[in-house]
Amino acid sequence: MDSVLKGKHIVLGITGGIAAYKSVTLLRLLVKAGAEVQVVITPAGKEFITPVTLSALSGKPVVSEFFTANTGEWHSHVDLGIWADLMVIAPATASTIGKMANGIADNMLVTTYLSAKEHVMIAPAMDLDMMAHPSTVRNLATLESYGVEIIEPAAGELASHLVGKGRMEEPENIFSRIEKYFLSQCDLKGKKVAITAGPTYEKLDPVRFIGNYSSGKMGFALAEECASRGADVTLVCGPVSLVTTNPNIVRVDVESAEEMLAAARQPFAEADFGIFAAAVADYRPEVRAQSKLKREGAEDMTLRLVRNPDIAATLAATKRDGQVFAGFALETDHEHENAFKKLHKKNLDMVVLNSLQDKGAGFGTDTNKITILSKDGTEKTFPLKSKRAVAADILDLMCSFK
Ligand code: C5P
């Protein structure tokens, strides 16, 4: 069976402590389990372990500076922060812990931490007196309050030959904590999920259609996230240029809203979780011409459109007890009011609101910024994240309705 780490994106931060040599073992364990690891090292870290060893093992150039000296290539901590499913800093020195707790972003590692959208773990390593100093204790408490998971150092003989608390946890144990973290996210084993995604194309004639700019990225990210949590996923999608990678996803390609509804009926009837992420055309041409429409010298042309079925409203109308259905709303005005209306009108459990006013949110982007409105009247706003991380937030909330 594949490790839960397979395909996971992990940023491994290494700082300047003698325990840095143990990070090589951790890196090897992560890579062996199928994770993609990007090492970010502080300048002091390079005094303890060579970047060549780390890039050879991770298969990626190690990042340390903001720029590569000879090429001038910029390394984006923001991109790395969005890319990462998890950031682990091992060893974490008193200095790095202090910088993280106080936002002193003077190196690539701390800037990446400040940009990280997902879970962060640190494995402190330092001398016993440094570990016990009130400033370290306070900084660790601050980081904990920010949601950082602290992997407590063990007691034992330290590099200084003093004996006490400060020895970095063994790489095998850090690896287990990482596995445990990802396992705790896998809460969809044996569950069925149905998802609609992408645009619909409504044909005018054999060569033209009415469509929209939906890329399908959000729906596909949801499908991948559900499948990686062990669910059996049916993804009914309109015309998109995306591919699915997880074998737990059964993909059904359709073109029009009517085809989408027909293909979605059974999967949604059987699903534990249903997500309507498609941008369905509200109207279709009344007549679909059999041959190409001609200009015939006319200066204008009138198209008569008729209403398409509302797939979400149709399928959620017969929602059973225990089924949890979510829809999306992309609003320009009175966002909350309209989204709440939609929630009730379509009999959904939650509506994911993307605002066109938010940069990086909505169609075509790799990121999204959402607010989730739930049928119990609560709403939760999330920061800008990768669509995959947004998918995880949506699923975590859907699971809480079960
Ligand atoms: O009414 P509106 O289009 O804003 O609602 C958006 C939500 O309803 C989305 O979840 C979308 O997938 C779904 N929808 C649908 N069928 C339609 C229109 C919208 O499933 N015809």
Image (cartoon, rainbow, N blue to C red):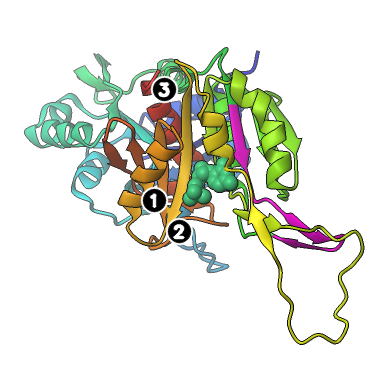
Q: Measure how far apart labels 1 and 3 are at the Cα level.
A: 22 Å
**Residue at the image point whose x is 27% and y is 21% from the top:** 153
Q: In the rendered image, which residue does mark 1 sit on?
A: 384
Label 3 element class:
helix
Of the pair 113 and 304, the residue shown nearer to us: 304
Q: Residues within 10 Å of mark 2 (few under 14, many from 20)?
A: some
Q: First in sequence: mark 1 or mark 2? A: 2
Of the pair 22 and 283, the residue shown nearer to us: 283
User: Is 335 located above or below residue 297 in the figure?
Assistant: above
User: Is 318 located above or below residue 389 in the figure?
Assistant: above
Of the pair 168 and 364, the residue shown nearer to us: 364
Q: First in sequence: mark 1 or mark 3? A: 1
Magenta extent: 194-210
Say whether marks 1 and 2 touch (CB < 8 Å).
Answer: yes
Q: In the rendered image, which residue does mark 3 sit on?
A: 399
278 with respect to 397 (left or right):
right
Percent position of residue 209, x then y: 75, 61
Q: In the rendered image, which residue does mark 2 sit on?
A: 360
13 with respect to 190 (left or right):
left
- Report how many numbered discs are placed on residues in the image: 3
The amino acid beneath tag 2 is Gly
Percent position of residue 269, x then y: 60, 21
The amino acid beneath tag 3 is Cys
**Residue at the image point whose x is 41% and y is 43% from the top:** 342
213 with respect to 169 (left or right):
right
